[in-house]
Amino acid sequence: MAHKAAGHLPGRSCVRRGRGGAPPPASPGSRSASPQGAEPRERRTGAGARRHGQPQPGALGGRGAGLHRAAVRRAGRRHDRGGAHAHQAAGPQGSRPEAEVVRVQDLGQTGGHNPPVQNVRIDPNSLSFNMWKEIPVPFYLSVYFFDVVNPDAVLLGQKPQVRERGPYVYREFRHKSNITFNDNDTVSFLEYRSFQFQPDKSHGLESDYIVMPNILVLAAAMMMEDKPMSLKLIMTLAFSTLGERAFMNRTIGEIMWGYEDPLIHLINKYLPNMLPFKGKFGLFAELNNSDSGIFTVFTGVKDFSRIHLVDKWNGLSKVNFWHSDQCNMINGTSGQMWAPFMTPETSLEFYSPEACRSMKLIYKESGTFQGIPTYRFVAPSTLFANGSVYPPNEGFCPCLESGIQNVSTCRFNAPLFLSHPHFYNADPMLAEAVLGLHPNQEEHSLFLDIHPVTGIPMNCSVKLQLSLYIKAIKGIGQTGKIQPVVLPLVWFEESGAMEGKPLKTFYTQLVLMPNVLHYAQYVLLALGCILLLIPIIHQLRSQEKCYLFWSSSKKGSKDKEAIQAYSESLMTPAPKGTVLQEARL
């Protein structure tokens, strides 16, 4: 049970269009509006440059000496041709950067700010398919055990005292198999999981012994509470014969992955359908080298708004563990990836088979992970609230104090409860009833950091606790005088962070390149403006010189004679060795 609650918190996303999310992206077949708007602008810009560069009719007219006017006209034609050639060369260069800016901007959007939907949907041809099939985030399961320090005193009615042991860290491996694409825009798959102990990351070994409640004995005693006294006495005799006690001293490996117990064989012999397992019993035995059931989720190929949402789990559209339709609903994703284009109004919803319910996380804040922008999602205070505090959770009852969820109906009726570690964010009475608990937000709250554009998890830390409700049962001597208490068994953290080559590739393609292209568009735009201004300025200066010749022809005859003499001197080859000086008009 533990794992899915943790392992599939990377799961459900209710990023649906029309629910406060980002506007729906353009369809794959639609064309960007930017290039369409850029083409007319490019043509207008080129035409405008040519209009400015060409001399206006009559600009060089006026009265002047014939030679003077001819020289001016020839100069004007030379400048005219030069300006035209300059603009024929500069026009495309001046307009091309503008068109490139649009394409670069569009590429930047497709690369990181607004990836095409065909690249994020579940499709073997999409860029994210392999990432969906094999999530490139190494996950670690860290387990903390509550070692009961005073088991004999607990049997006498005293308050239990626990000591936290761990973490015992396991590398988690996942892979999808039996991937089948269906005709209704869904895909079905099984996800297998296995765990490998990591001694270098652990504070202890699997051979360490700890004292814990005997879940089989105490759970069976709770189930017999309302049975006839004769059956209780028979059970007490059976426990004594088999050597069963209320507390047991076993290794970490046995508690995690299972141990042989004669009580299991006895129950399976006379009550064959009572327990869901036939061999060893362990808290995580069902999760190692196993799958979490057949998930059928929407691919988003035909309807992108439903991408990653669960259609069915093990062929069911809803479960029947709880007492209301709302609590039995299978909502959200399977806990693999999230729908893209998230907003702060987005919430993450997912279905957890081991918790037997759907859960929802809420947005807390935006941040960055290794330079990659992320949204952080956390558990609301109502996640495990009881029905009196949060009425929608009434279907999960019978409830005890607020902040713990009764999961007995989907766990062979054993009085097991799910909560945050150390009863964080729960009724303070729960932590006060057990010595050695110190709930705090920094160590015991969960979070998920998601890249909002792609919906891919960057960093996550999911922390949950499993507890057992115990008390003395009249007629069953093994329970002694135990006072009613919710006693923590283990709490676990499933953490994962993108690293190594996948992180570098993700950062380069979705952060670095879009930023480079974003600034490159301004550089290209500035370059285009410069290329447009150079021939315009050049033409204006040539027109100014011609205007000076024309205006000087209106002055006195002495000036005319000086100008004509100067013009003739320009047409007469200079004697060898003569130094020409500029004439100032």
Image: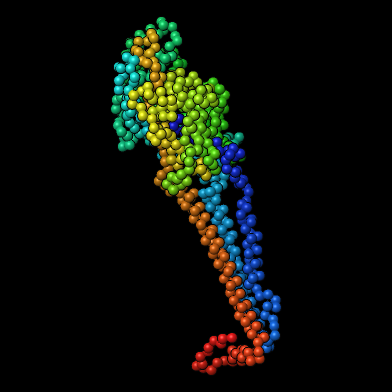
Where's residue 34, x and y in %?
61, 54
Q: Position of residue 123 (x, y in %)?
A: 55, 41
Residue reaching furthest to the front: 556
Q: Nearer the viewer, residue 269 or 478?
A: 478
- Judged left or right of residue 534, residue 355 is left
Corner quadrant of residue 162: top left
Give the colour scheme shown: rainbow
**Residue sitting at x 44%, y 48%:** 371
Residue 397 percent across, percent down from the top left: 50, 21
Q: Quadrant of the N terminus?
A: top left
In the current view of this chain or complex, which residue is farthest to the bottom? 575
Regarding residue 51, the answer to whether it shows in the image is yes
Q: Quadrant of the C terminus?
A: bottom right
Q: Residue at x 63, y 83 (%)?
A: 549
Q: Quadrant of residue 23?
A: top right
Report if residue 334 is visible in the image. no
Residue 145 in the image: state x and y as whole percent.
Answer: 35, 27
Residue 335 vs 111, above or below: the answer is above
Q: What's the residue at 61%, 74% (across, down)?
A: 540
Q: In this rendering, is residue 261 above or below 293?
A: above
Residue drawn at x 60%, y 43% is: 24
Residue located farthest toward the top when viewing the structure as drawn: 230
The residue lying toward the viewer, choosing from 24 and 344, is 344
For the image, the number of numbered tags is 0
